[in-house]
Image (spheres, rainbow, N blue to C red):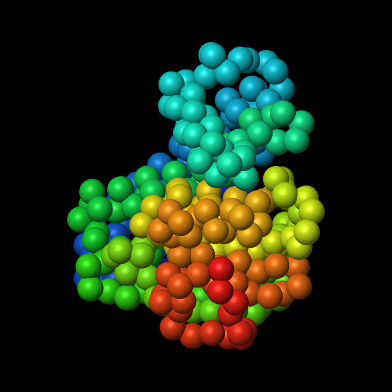
Amino acid sequence: MTVDVWEAMGTVISLRIPDAFEHSRGPAVEGVARVIDSLEQEYSLYREDSPISHLARGEITLESMSADFRDTYARAIEWRNDTGGAFTPHRSDGVIDLSGIVKADAIAAGAVVLRAHGITDFSLNFGGDIIVSGDTRIWPIAIGHPIDTHGTLATVELNSVWSAIATSGTGDRGEHIWRSVTTGTRTIGATVISDDIVASDVWATSIVSGGHEAATNAGRRGYAVLYVDENLTIHANPLMRNLISEETFSPLTSV
């Protein structure tokens, strides 16, 4: 198994490809890096020269943005509606921030590039959000603890059906997620597994924002859900329990 690691969008990307695909690994990795870089150039608010930074400063209008940008923004609005407002593409100051779905878009685009090069087995990890592929391969993935950066809550087994996992929380960056629910027990970390990395990413963020109600809504849509509240109580729905191969912190409370 060959592992390629590089940095993009302020985080670390790691790509694991079995040795059987070594003949096409180089061009495939270069293609993944290019597609991620192209998204970063357009959507990164950390780049002063990106179109979204020009938009944030009021130098251009939303109407003048590219069709792809406006489509991404429209999809983010649809996600806001689907999550009952727990997910939003707007910062508190009104600035459009599409990082909530663009990183997942980058992962999904990277997977398309890999398959186009004939690589059908891989694990693409983008800052802890992961998509895996392989008809017969099982990929063990650790879910990190939201406070103890060296700790693990559980290990799950991903496959060709449950192939996309995303985690959101306050552990690495503090209180950076806008909260739609500001009363009651806060959620400090959430993990969602599905067959769609964008859905997993959006709902993981939404659960941190919207708490138990958002977690329940995600479960109703057929997603595997685990979240941790500020009392360090760990909640997991039945779908997530079925994917857990090892519990490090017990017990898990049903959700």
Q: Is residue 43 visible?
A: yes
Q: Is residue 41 visible?
A: no
Looking at the rendering, in which quadrant would you find the N terminus?
bottom left
Nearer to me, 16 or 208: 208
Question: In the drawing, does residue 123 fall left or right of residue 178?
Answer: left
Nearer to me, 30 or 219: 219
Q: Residue at x 65, y 51 (%)?
A: 210
Give x and y (percent) for residue 42. 53, 31
Give x and y (percent) for residue 105. 44, 44
Q: Residue at x 46, y 56 (%)?
A: 220
What residue occupies the far right of the structure in this picture? Answer: 183
For the image shown, how many numbered marks are present on the structure?
0
| Quarter holding residue 53 | top right
Give x and y (percent) for residue 197. 43, 53
Looking at the rendering, in which quadrant would you find the C terminus?
bottom right
Q: Is residue 28 above or below residue 252?
A: above
Nearer to me, 196 or 13: 196
Q: Residue at x 75, y 35 (%)?
A: 92
Give x and y (percent) for residue 187. 69, 61
